[in-house]
Amino acid sequence: MAKNDNAHAVRLVSSLVQTVGPEKAREFEETYPLSKSASIEKKFKWAQNVCDYLEQNFDPETVAIIRKACRCSDGKSNAAKLRKYLEQTDTIEDFVNAFNRHETFASLEYISDHKILFCYPECYCSCVKRVPQTLSETWCACTVGNAEETFRAVFHDGVRVTLRESIKTGADRCTLEVEW
């Protein structure tokens, strides 16, 4: 059997085990292995296969759960930055402005006192960012999981994140709506 030791593949298999069980996870792992040494083209093709497999085998809610658990980060470092700006300001609008003055990895847009947009100027996914082709929105659901963890650490429970657009689906930026 081919190696399946790429971090993206390991996270996906773990998420499949948790969400749909070990049998489905093993089936996927055997059909679509991905090694650490895979080329950028092979990683991109694997990501396409992931989207096709998930969309053909599971309902949209299950697909979202599976992909959200595949996040590359626990969001703690970004949450610490966001909390710092929130603690230094009196309003959400001031929080957004403070963040935007000091950070470049992302930007915030104020919508209301309980809703903002969290925007990335580029795709940060090491698995697909270097291939100039688009992918299904399914792939980008992992960033929803990352943003949920990040903003729960800032605003606590009741955070809802919705992917509005992503670079890998053809947009100019990745935009997530965050509501609490």
Image: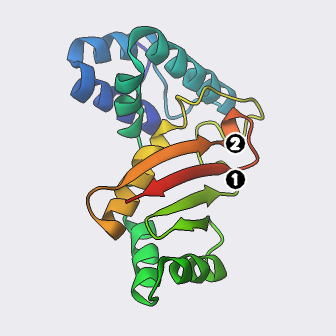
| Amino acid type for the residue under numbered disc 2 | Ile
> In percent of the image, x 62 and y 58: which residue is there?
119
**The quarter of the displayed image where residue 86 is located:** bottom left
Classify mark 1: helix, strand or loop: loop
**Along the horizontal axis of the image, is 96 left or right of 10?**
right
Is residue 72 visible to the viewer in this orientation of the structure?
no
On residue 122, the disc is: 1
Q: Above or below — where is 31 with respect to 176?
A: above
Q: Above or below — where is 134 with respect to 162?
A: above
> Could you tell me how many numbered marks the image carries?
2
Q: Position of residue 18 (x, y in %)?
A: 22, 29
Q: Above or below — where is 39 with respect to 89?
A: above
**Image quadrant occupied by the N terminus:** top left
| Amino acid type for the residue under numbered disc 1 | Glu
Is residue 109 visible to the viewer in this orientation of the structure?
yes
Q: Position of residue 147 (x, y in %)?
A: 44, 54
> In percent of the image, x 29 and y 31: which residue is there?
14
**Image quadrant occupied by the C terminus:** bottom left
On residue 167, the disc is: 2
Q: Position of residue 5 (x, y in %)?
A: 41, 31
> In percent of the image, x 64 and y 36: which residue is there?
128
Q: Residues within 10 Å of mark 2 (few under 14, many from 20)?
A: many
**Along the horizontal axis of the image, is 171 left or right of 154?**
right
Classify mark 2: helix, strand or loop: helix
